[in-house]
């Protein structure tokens, strides 16, 4: 099973600032990585797939990068609606499909 | 759109049948998964079923207790959950699988149905 490790667990950022979230895989997942956003009381929403391709309707301030075992989700200028929990998920070697434990982006 | 139903309060050892009604896309063209989230915790993939239903996978934590199925004529996905334990308490989401080849990311997700296992 591929273990996904996200850091930090919590990120405190001021509105308008840049946020950088990390996701590390226990073995290579190539570019087969997705990112999701989850707000309280809501289902997760797909942000990024293929490590760097934005899903339909996702603003350009969200960008993904990386390959192999190290990945980054960057939010260039945080808006109020971006404060949420973010999860990475690998789909390179499955089953099982595995998620990281999430990074909570909170208002500083 | 995906809409789950069937959750509720059940005693340890009990059973439930979760349903997911799909609309707005050709259901029979897509593989589907169930994913759960325990209260205050992260996401855990539970089960996968291919578009035609011939290929099925389960997480080790539910293998032998949960059964996934689908009815393409009724645009519906199901999860029969048996021998429930306290640690199965979670919101259960259905999600459409997407991606070429062996890729499998999830988009969209349903709103979830809560299963609570307690005596």
Image: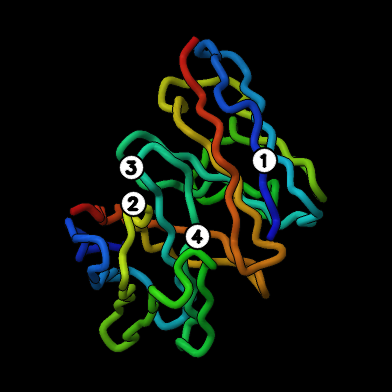
User: Which label belongs to residue A42?
Assistant: 3
User: Which label belongs to residue B90?
Assistant: 2
Tell me what residue is drawn at x 75 percent, y 54 percent: A31
Residue B31 at x, y percent in the picture = 49, 75
Quadrant for the N terminus of chain A, please: bottom right
* Residue corresponding to mark 1: A5
Report if the CB atoms under discs 4 and 3 are less than 8 Å apart.
no
Q: Is residue A44 left or right of residue A77?
A: left
Counting residues from the start of the chain, the first of labels 4 and 2 encountered is: 4
Q: Which chain does tag 3 point to?
A: A
Determine whether A39 is above or below B74 in the image: above
Tell me what residue is drawn at x 30 percent, y 79 percent: B75
Residue A101 in which image quadrant: top right
Of labels 3 and 1, the one closer to you: 1
Crowd band around label 4 with a 10 angstrom C-alpha radius: few (<14), some (14–19), many (20+): many
Q: Which chain does tag 4 point to?
A: B
Tell me what residue is drawn at x 59 percent, y 34 percent: A62
Crowd band around label 1 with a 10 angstrom C-alpha radius: few (<14), some (14–19), many (20+): many
Which element is circle 4 on? strand
Cα separation between marks 4 and 3: 17 Å
Report if the CB atoms under discs 2 and 3 are less than 8 Å apart.
no
Q: Which chain does tag 2 point to?
A: B
Same-chain check, marks 2 and 3: no
Which element is circle 3 on? loop
Counting residues from the start of the chain, the first of labels 3 and 1 encountered is: 1
Which element is circle 2 on? strand
Determine whether B60 is above or below B74 in the image: above
Residue B39 at x, y percent in the picture = 35, 41
Counting the numbered discs, the total is 4
* Residue corresponding to mark 4: B45
């Amino acid at each position: 099973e591929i273990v996904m490790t996200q850091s930090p667990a919590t990120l405190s950022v001021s509105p308008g600032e840049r946020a950088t979230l990390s996701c590390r895989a226990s073995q290579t997942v190539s570019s087969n990585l997705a990112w999701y956003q989850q707000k309280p009381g809501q289902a997760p929403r797909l942000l990024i797939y293929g490590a760097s391709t934005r899903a339909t309707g996702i603003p350009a301030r969200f960008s993904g990068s990386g390959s192999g075992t190290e990945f980054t989700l960057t939010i260039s200028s945080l808006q109020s609606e971006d404060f949420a929990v973010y999860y990475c998920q690998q789909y390179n070697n499955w089953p099982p499909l595995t998620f990281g434990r999430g990074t909570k982006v909170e208002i500083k | 759109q995906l809409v789950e139903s069937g959750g509720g309060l059940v005693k340890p050892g009990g059973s439930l049948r979760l349903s997911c009604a799909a609309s707005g896309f050709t259901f029979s063209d897509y593989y589907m998964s169930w994913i759960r989230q325990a209260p205050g915790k992260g996401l855990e993939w539970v089960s996968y079923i291919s578009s035609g239903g011939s290929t099925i996978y389960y997480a080790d934590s539910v293998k032998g207790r949960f059964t996934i199925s689908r009815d393409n004529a009724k645009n519906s996905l199901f999860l029969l959950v048996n021998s429930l334990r306290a640690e199965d308490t979670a919101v259960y989401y259905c999600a459409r699988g997407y991606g070429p080849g062996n890729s499998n990311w999830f988009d969209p997700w349903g709103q979830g149905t809560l299963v609570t296992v307690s005596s």
